[in-house]
Amino acid sequence: MSGWLARHLQALLFALGRLVRAPWATGFTVAVIAIALTLPAGFALLVESASRVSDQAATAIDLSVYFKLETPLPEVQQRASQLRTRPDVSAVQVITAEQALQQLQQDSGLAAALAALGDNPLPQVISLRPSASASSPAALDALRRELAAWPQVDTVQVDGDWARRLTAILALLRRLALTVGGVLALGVVAVVGNIIRLEIHSRRAEIDITQLVGGSPAFIRRPFLYTGALYGGLGAVLAMVLLTVGSLLLATPVSQLAVSYGSRFALAAPGLREFGALLAAGVLLGLTGAWIAASRQLAALHPRYES
Amino acid sequence: MIRFDRVTKRYASGREALAGVSFEIAAGEMVFLTGRSGAGKSSVLRLIALLQHPSRGQVNVLGRDLAKLPKGQVPAFRRQLGMVFQDHRLLLDRSVFDNVALPLVVAHTPLADLDKRVRAALDQVGLLDRIQARPLELSVGEQQRVGIARAIVGRPPLLVADEPTGNLDPQLSREIMALFGRLRDAGATVVVASHDMALVRESGLRQIQLVEGRLADTGVAP
């Protein structure tokens, strides 16, 4: 084993040993870090789940083309045939005035009143869905203006406002998750930094002796850095456990709620990718906190000797 | 090996611990640093170990002007110095082995060599059978001997001991002084701070005597 590796292994085992020898203190610290990591990670996971639904919804925006009342059905069908040949349109459906009236009579419970009208007051309608590549707001607007310019068309309605709102809300939530995550990450750095600061004070005598026998700053600092990294890493592992348990407990009720609203929304369970990211974030934050505290504190310490 | 040139040390309180002290200790020499409490012995030791700097004058140790030693080289300098502290300075939560091994650990000594040298050092101070004990399980004298083992384990060219026999009985004191004598014979320079004038006289070695921060004598004690 190389000397470098042996020194690092020694520092790691030493740091691990100190954490194990103080299980309660270690447990509380790890729990605080885990909670600080779980909150933004859970939030991000929720936003990620919602994004998948939102992505599907973004490509499911329909346009309804309402024709003028006097427009004959063959003319509408001819326009529908034209639309079916376009690459920026993926689906076209003609809803005749008669079909619309029948539907209204069934759904509204106003069958008698509608029958009393005599003439059908509803227009012929073409419902079309743009292809995924033509679902951007600009492309939709261009298509809407083109269709509205047809002489037989009365009005064109884009039925995707809700999807755009959902996308905007998700963007806001994503930004919020980042902000909360950033603040809590600073919290983790502060917690670990404060613990390392206290640990340096409690081990002042040992640091004095190590300095007196020629321990370099790197040698003295190393176990504290490993302690910080271990706190962060253990916090990340516990956060992952909390996230997994949380997502398992919430998956069924959330899915049932979504189904009741006609949505296929499902809570995503954290996977290996999320675990890797969380572990890396935890270790990095712990290391950062430890580095800041150890560098500042140790630079100010000089060995004391009173005889 | 050690040269003090008109060294003055004045503390923030205004107390002058050393006033223009000059002396030399040759390589391979063993000397006593004597004087009553408050005479300036500890200030001399702190200056040698680079725990403080002189207010005036120049301190040369191991061929280095300590005022010019870069901060990054201080740990390496201290590794060439074996220090025996009056209050032992042991790590109470570590075994005797771990305490003695510390200077070798910080010097990145290979494990196999480390084990051999720690055992040899403990054998020299007669504590090989207490290798796994914790400091608090030892008598004060045994703790002092662990401190001595830690100071000599790295085979430093310069050994500085502050009242190393203060807690030992006369027989053990003589044994420890004999051990220092063997280290001197092996080429090390040894500086022993002591107020035990009987021990100093018995040794027949040169003393650097301080009185109220001033050099009073640098000859063999009468």
Image (cartoon, coloured by chain):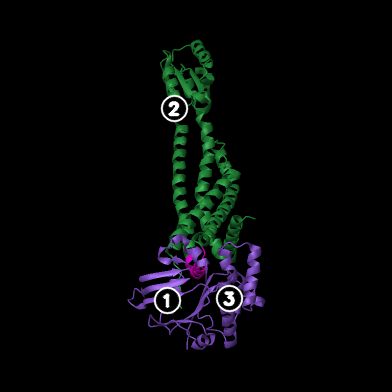
Chain colours: A green, B purple
Label 1–label 3 contact, CB within 8 A: no
On the image, the x and y values in percent for residue A113 come to 47, 24
Quadrant of the rendered image containing residue B38: bottom left
On the image, the x and y values in percent for residue A148 come to 42, 18
Give the residue drawn at x 63%, y 75%.
B122
On the image, the x and y values in percent for residue A274 come to 57, 45
Which span of residues is magenta-colored? A200-215
Q: Nearer the viewer, mark 3 or mark 2?
A: 3
Q: Which residue is mark 3?
A: B185
On the image, the x and y values in percent for residue A67 come to 45, 16
- Total marks shown come to 3
Give the residue drawn at x 55%, y 74%.
B90
* Residue type (three-letter) at the residue carrying disc 2: Pro
Secondary structure at numbered mark 3: helix
Secondary structure at numbered mark 1: strand
Q: For residue B173: magenta?
A: no
